[in-house]
């Protein structure tokens, strides 16, 4: 007998849970795109998008997923033949580098593996060795969703400055924005990309590029009209925001999501994510005391508060995921980019997530471990409950 009927729950690292209020905001007739409310609403998003990124710089919105923001960031700053330094800590930064390579950009990679953050010393060595100043930009990911590592972006800025290197610092915050603290201006980030379907709780379909004056100044001789961030940032006419038709309903959804973040307060949003992440880790630490289950990232300081990658041994990762899906209505994330993929799974805990949702995920996983006879340590749910109880 399956116990999956009832409200299903997607606990993957994006798309995340969409709040009912966001869904309601989107459930409307097509608005007037020529004037009025939609224009005011779009204008109102700009300061709030800057606020979540903690920047006074510029932001451009694209109709597209995170991959669109990746391409936009590259197209506005680099030319074929330029070199970028990719700091790989999982699948996503490698993917951004592959996109750069597709655009004719030369890619130099420092691969830090699948279970460790960026090695800042190695980065400093590569920058100092670049005496010809060939490296035009560093591509890095704040939280790599495949490994759930969180990188020290402020530390990277210090390394760039110590090496006296003027490469642009470009950060992917697609998984982390609105979950893990990120401060674009204070941390000296030149370009940041994100998308709406993770911490921003809106259906996938719009993405963003924040950029400072330094990044704008290196503009290549030719920038495609579509990707050009300038008109989108400072439009004379409304259609220039999106270089065509506005993503009308997404804008209403995003407005509501940003209102929810403002109402809770960004610091409270970060604190909630941190406590819920520690709840997940507490359970995993117990399961890990006996058997194959382990947290992918050993040091809590290097772990994301938005997603947790779990080592489960092959084929336990896939087996547990399938059991949760088919027997209990819970969808966990696949072992994306890992080999063998069935030895891993991921838990998304980003965005519209609270204590009972996390306890539900952990309780369901506990049932799956028992049902599948996967060896595990005892006391996980008690340990998780103690973190919630402490607040
Ligand atoms: C989800 C994600 C992406 C890809 O975003 P899409 O919207 O699927 O294109 C890129 N980078 C990171 C870190 C992500 O978490």
Image: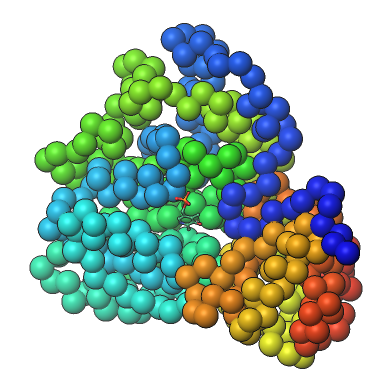
Measured as percent of width and height from the top left, residue 12 is found at: 63, 58
> Which residue, as the protein is rendered here, is positioned at the far front?
1
Measured as percent of width and height from the top left, residue 110 is found at: 32, 75
**Would you say residue 104 is visible in this rendering?**
yes
**Quadrant where the N terminus is found in the figure:** bottom right
> Which residue, as the protein is rendered here, is positioned at the far bottom?
290
**Would you say residue 185 is visible in this rendering?**
no
The quadrant holding residue 218 is: top left
Q: What residue do we see at 38% from left, 70% from top?
A: 88
As drawn, 244 above or below 383 = above
As drawn, 138 above or below 182 = below
Measured as percent of width and height from the top left, residue 148 is found at: 56, 68
Measured as percent of width and height from the top left, residue 201 is found at: 62, 42
The quadrant holding residue 2 is: bottom right
Q: What residue do we see at 45% from left, 44% from top?
A: 65
**Quadrant where the C terminus is found in the figure:** bottom right
Q: What residue do we see at 51% from left, 11% from top?
A: 32
* Count of residue discs: 0
Say which of 104 and 304 sits in front.
104
Left or right: 336 with respect to 158?
A: right
Left or right: 70 with respect to 321?
A: left
């Amino acid at each position: 007998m399956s116990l999956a009927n009832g409200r299903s729950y997607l606990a993957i690292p994006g798309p995340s849970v969409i709040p009912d209020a966001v869904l309601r905001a989107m459930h409307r007739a097509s608005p007037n795109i020529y004037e009025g409310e939609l224009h005011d609403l779009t204008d109102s998003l700009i300061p709030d998008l800057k606020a979540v990124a903690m920047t006074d710089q510029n932001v451009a919105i694209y109709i597209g997923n995170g991959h669109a923001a990746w391409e936009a960031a590259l197209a506005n700053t680099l030319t074929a033949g330029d070199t970028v330094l990719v700091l790989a800590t999982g699948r996503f930064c490698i993917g951004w580098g592959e996109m750069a390579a597709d655009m004719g950009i030369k890619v130099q990679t420092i691969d830090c593996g699948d279970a460790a953050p960026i090695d800042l010393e190695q980065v400093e060595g590569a920058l100092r060795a670049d005496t010809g100043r060939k490296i035009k930009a560093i591509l890095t990911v704040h939280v790599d969703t495949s490994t759930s590592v969180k990188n020290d972006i402020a530390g990277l800025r210090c390394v760039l400055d110590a090496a006296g290197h003027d490469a642009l610092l470009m950060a992917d915050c697609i998984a982390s924005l609105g979950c893990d603290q990120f401060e674009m201006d204070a941390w000296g980030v030149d370009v940041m990309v994100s998308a709406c379907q993770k911490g921003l709780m809106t259906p996938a379909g719009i993405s963003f590029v924040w950029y400072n004056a330094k990044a704008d100044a290196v503009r290549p001789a030719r920038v495609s009209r579509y990707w050009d961030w300038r008109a989108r940032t400072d439009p004379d006419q409304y259609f220039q925001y999106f270089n065509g038709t506005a993503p009308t309903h997404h804008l209403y959804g995003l407005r509501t999501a940003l209102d929810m973040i403002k109402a809770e307060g960004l610091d409270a949003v970060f604190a909630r994510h941190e406590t819920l992440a520690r709840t997940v880790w507490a359970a995993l630490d117990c399961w890990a005391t006996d058997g194959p289950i382990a947290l992918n990232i050993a040091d809590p300081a290097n772990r994301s508060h938005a997603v947790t990658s779990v080592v489960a041994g092959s084929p336990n990762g896939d087996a547990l995921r399938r059991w949760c899906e088919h027997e209990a209505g819970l969808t966990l994330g696949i072992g994306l980019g890992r080999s063998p993929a069935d030895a891993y799974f991921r838990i998304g805990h980003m965005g519209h997530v609270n204590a009972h949702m996390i306890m539900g995920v952990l309780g369901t996983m506990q049932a799956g471990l028992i049902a599948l006879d996967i060896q595990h340590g005892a006391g996980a749910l008690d340990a998780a409950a103690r973190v919630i109880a402490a607040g």
